[in-house]
Amino acid sequence: MSSSDSQATKELLVEILAEELPALPFLKEWHNLKQKWEQALAQVHIQAPCELHYTPRRIAIYSRAFPTHTTAQTQELYGPPLEIAFINGDRAQGLSKAGLGFCKKAGIIDSTLGSHSGDFVDFGATADHQSRSTPKSTKSPTSNTANPRILEEEKQAEREKQPQSKNAILESTFEKTQKVDSKENAASVKKPQAEGFCDDFVGCQAIGKGATLAVVTADDCADSRKSAQKPTPETQKAESLLQVVEKDGKQVLYVRKLQAGLESRQVLGEVVVAFVRSLHFGKSMRWGDAQEGSGSESFIRPIRNIMILLGGEPITAKAGTKIFGQSFLPATLLHRSYKPQAQDLLESSCDNAAQEAWVKITGLDAYLDKLSNGGVILSADEREKRILAQIRAIESAHQVQVKLDSALLAQIVAITEYPTALLGSFDEQFLALPEEVITTSMKEHQKYFSVYKDGRLYQGFIVVANALCDDFSAIISGNERVLKARLSDAEFFYNNDIVTPLDKAPLSQVAYIQGLGSMLDKVGREERVGAYLARLWGQDSALITQALAYAKADLLSEMVGEFPELQGIMGYYYALEQGFPQELAQAIKEQYLPNGESSALPSSKISAIVALSGKLESLLGLFSLGTIPSGSKDPFALRRAANGVVKIVLEWNLAFDIKQILVDLAKECGYAISQENLARLQGFIIERLESILDIPTQIFRSASRGTSTDLCTIANNAKALESLLARDDREALIAVFKRVANITKDISVGELVGSTQKADSSDISAILEIINTSLLTQPEQALYTRLREIDSAKRGGKLTHSSDKLAALFDLRDVLEAFFDKVLVNDDDPALRRNRKSLLYAIYAEFCTIGDLKELAI
């Protein structure tokens, strides 16, 4: 293949045509498709710029410059060490089985050559080895290795025992050498194995297994020696490729090969099939007959066709075979409402062409033109732009505002090939229903956008049709009839629910989780958690426990049964209808917040405590059972619950000592949770804090391993430490403070005061009192004075924030460096040594209230 061929490119078009793809599972996988396509190409050594697009029925991949050949590859193969690669480690004796096996694996010796140990292969000179040729090698009858010396000794012993004719000796020896299997052509007799016989048995020549004995002359034997010294085509190949290099301190065989690229059309079929098989959408379908090649395959929806065109030429499956139940047709299907012209259709003899309007495709431009003219907008971005432009036109024409939901918009884009936004309406009487009931019914069941006018919900909706027509009135009226039926059902459910008292909900009949009782049991535990948190933060305990008592009542309502998304929201409306205070109803409504990445948070501290009570009870209960999320498995959404706890605590700046509160709440709930699982839960919530703060790992680890276990304090400490990264002197700061940590990390207050006390203290005042000021030198006195200033500022309320405290500690750098330059900490005098360590320990203990110095490595 020439270099120009390797650089040549052609247009590539791939289309995977299927039945309508469900939007939600497809969109989850869509963001991985480009990477998976590139990985499939990489497997065959192809790199090419490609565009990927989708519609409800197709995944299209195309490139304007797709290489016609795969990239040539350089392959490096390391063989066995020389002591293993050669017989008895001796190059003169030839390659061993291991050496021959490596050569065959590397493809530098034909697999039929040297199938027994002892065949000699001459190889070219390298920096470590000069070429040599040593014929004379055959297999001993008693050994798996060929050794002419052993054979000679045996022959000599035979001659000494009984004189025999050379022919008779050769016949005897030939019987022993029949095990030698060089699998050569019988006509090729001048081989090294034969030469060993020629030395002693002029007139005879051993040929090979299964061959006869031939009488030859002494000249033939001489010719044989000359022939054996001439490399065969196989050994010539080996001479050019086989080398000796050093690896891991040993001399080993080495081959470097250049593998030429293949024609891309030879591998494209398997690339596309591998790509399709790599896609995972959750649930998949099987279809067709296994004997036809489809029953053993699965995909999110049945595949109708796979089209591959390279340079306009179709690449099809092998004759008589099908993949995913389909042949590779150079054709596609356009919009279901579009009728193509007869000359564009594929011949009826091709598969399903007689039943459906399969349009033949001859190249990339033809494909794009056919789609554009046939009611298919291939680009999802273009479909979205079209929808948004039409919605803006409707807003302007009718003086309304459309509430755009990005997730709903993405779904609509994924289920339409030629979208058209239309304005419909519903009866004004339904506006008496809660707004969330109407909007949820339209969004979840009908995929409609809600419409507002003057800031209030309007009796209209936006439906996006996937049709090719001039008159959309039938589509609009049909959707209006469907929505009227939906809203009539919702009205019936709501009127039934509001007359059912919240305290009459039979929660005891609803199972919660095996091992944790009923939903009524959960509500009771949440009330105890809420009461504890209300006392801790000085809130209305009665109001909070009452809200928690009614919070789960709407789970048994008909409306929530129809629309599970409305749990909590319907409880809010039912509570207001039944005369409960607004604050209580609001707490019921917001009990599940935050329920997403960008979700709102509870709007009051009462609502915050109600939301925290449910989340903390769930976390404690499931961790007590050992049900802990691992990897991507989180069936009870505990990560979301822990995220909610952290976000609420940070939003309301609540004092939340995670270690103490979890222990207390486990007792309040009556959970017999092990210390191990309690520690896991604490770590689990701390991990969520790290994820939410999005702070470098080493900074957060330092803050989380300080002396504080309060979530807000840890967060503030981490943010303060992060400011360290912006300082120009950060390396010098870390160096001097880590020196303090290394000296004092194993010191206790008891050791400093000379008692058996082991508990460390973070009270800088108490530590400074230990110091004997009469023993201080000038550098020590300077450091002591600065520490006294920090202590005074703390007691005066001037260093309450983590950043202020850290700045004060960083200001000690100059006096600390002077201290280390002029003072010997580990002095021989015990009193001086203790005094100086006390100074440093005061700094270390104060820093530990912010973070662990040992974790910082910048």
Image: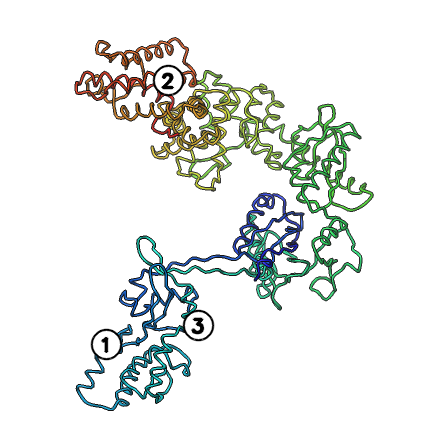
Of tags 3 and 1, the one toward the viewer is 3
Of tags 1 and 2, the one toward the viewer is 1
Q: Is 680 situated above or below 100?
A: above
Q: Which residue position is annotated with label 1?
A: 150
The residue most toward the right is 471
Q: Is residue 360 visible?
A: yes
Query: Between disc 1 and disc 2, whose residue precedes?
Result: 1
Percent of width and height locating residue 801 = 43, 16
The disc labelled 1 sits on which kind of residue? Ile
Give the numbered dot on residue 233. 3
The local secondary structure at tag 1 comes to: helix
Q: Which residue position is annotated with label 2?
A: 809
The C terminus appears in which quarter of the rendering?
A: top left
Percent of width and height locating residue 687 = 43, 32
Q: Is residue 548 left or right of residue 577?
A: left
The disc labelled 2 sits on which kind of residue? Leu
Q: Is 18 situated above or below 572?
A: below
Badge 2: residue crowd in 10 Å (few <14, some 14–19, many ≥20): some
- Could you tell me which residue is drawn at 64 percent across and 35 percent down? 406
The N terminus appears in which quarter of the rendering?
A: bottom right
Percent of width and height locating residue 448 = 70, 37
Query: Between disc 3 and disc 1, whose residue precedes?
Result: 1
Structural distance between the alpha carbons of marks 2 and 3: 79 Å
Q: Is 533 situated above or below 115?
A: above
Q: Is residue 777 left or right of residue 438?
A: left
Where residue 410 sits, quadrant-wise, is: top right
Query: Between disc 2 and disc 3, whose residue precedes?
Result: 3
Marks 2/3 in contact by CB < 8 Å: the verdict is no
